[in-house]
Amino acid sequence: MFGNKDKSFENIKDAETVIGPAIKVKGNFHGKGNIIIEGSLEGSIKTDSSLLIGEKAKVKANVKAKEAIINGSVDGNVNIDKALSLGKTASVKGDVVCAEISISQGAKVNGNFAMHETREEESKKEHKNTSSDKNNSK
Amino acid sequence: MHLYIYDDFLGKSKYNKTVNKIETRITDLGLSGKIIRLSNLKNIDNAIWSEIKRGARTLVVVGNDGSFNKVLKTLLAKEVSFFLDEIFLSFIPVESSQIGLSLGIKSYTDACNILLARRTESIKVAKANNYFFLSQAEVLLKNVSISIEDSYKLESSDKGSVYIINMPTFNISKLLPKKIDPRDEYLHIYIESKGHSFVPAKKIKVSGADKSYITLDNSTQIDLPCSLGMSGKKVNIIVGKNRVFL
């Protein structure tokens, strides 16, 4: 449906929540599981799983998700724990924070980018630091 | 002991042949029991309650989706619900029935065999205002507002239908992106319009213009606004192996 071949997003097809093109969502939309937005949304959106914003979707909201594909327009800050994919029709007006990013030619972003480490990387680092501290104390 | 509850419309002559066939099949299968007819009863609740007190534990509704909904309401009434864990509800639909198809019952002949096989599932019952429903509530999409968990609203100016589903009907189950489990704590909102929408929710409020209504289990209409959620009650139901839910 969305033509994204990135394997990390394969599970998005099993979306728990789908907002179709005829629907407007207003408020704090804290969904359960993977979410697909093809309609419009005003407020905020949050999920611990994957988020897919379709080509014709219009989102005026701060976005928080584990991973996301954006193909539509987002007016708000985007905060993604792991991978973010901006498709060629994506338009983001806001700051973007994520751990990994893929940007297709044609995607528009008006805002600042910041990259952070994934939780796995952070915990690996913490683990390394703890082990080296232990070795030093010996 | 089996208690057969016949709805009043079965008294019409056009159903005589069907009722005779059902009774013959039930006798052949050795499943005979007492029959009560809703047409003779002023108070359905009292009649069913007194049969349960006498030992009836398998209640077989013979009728349509409306008949099933009437008996479900009685079963969840205060007095009867004390016995709810021991009671098994079965359904013999005499005409096209969405609830029957949800339960994996294609016809009245099929229903008799399913009653004999006695495959059971404990299914949670949903509530809309003060009305119980087992399957789904349906409302027209245009100009309704659907508030979810008191935190966000779904709206649309397009035409379409909204289904608030506990146990999907056969027709709707074919359209859903995933199977619904009526044993969980969630209702699922399915909107059929330009594209499809699918949202799980625990607490739903549907508001609309004056004289708008929502239809429960293909039989009962109640006025909007309407609050929907799980009732906290469950019933044991005898189901077919081709039921549409998990």
Image: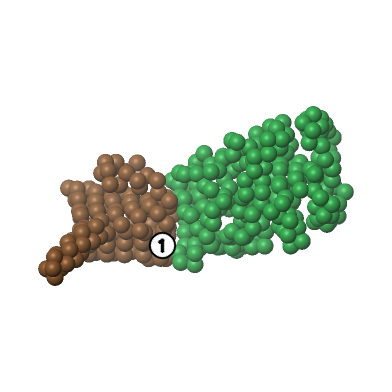
Q: Residue at x 29, y 53 (%)?
A: A68
Residue B144 lies, with reference to residue B92, above or below; the image says below
Q: Position of residue A104 (x, y in %)?
A: 19, 48
In the rendered image, which quarter is residue A82 located in?
A: bottom left
For this orientation, the residue located farthest to the bottom is: A137
Chain bearing tag 1 is A
Q: Residue drawn 60% across and 36% down?
A: B241
Q: Amino acid at mark 1?
A: Phe
User: The residue tagged with tag 1: helix, strand or loop?
Assistant: strand
Identify the chain drawn in green: B
On-image quarter of the N terminus of chain B: top right
User: Residue B17, relative to residue B144: is it above or below?
Assistant: above
Quick check: A3 left or right of B164? left
Give residue A5's position: percent from left, percent from top. 26, 41
Q: Residue at x 53, y 55 (%)?
A: B186
Chain shown brown: that is: A
Q: Position of residue B28 (x, y in %)?
A: 79, 29
**Residue at 54 percent of width and 53 percent of height:** B184
Q: Is residue A49 left or right of residue B22?
A: left
Q: Is residue B217 left or right of residue A2?
A: right
Q: Is residue A93 something that shows in the picture?
A: no
Rendering colour mode: by chain
Quarter holding residue B111: top right
Q: Which residue is mark 1?
A: A29
Q: Position of residue B233 (x, y in %)?
A: 64, 58
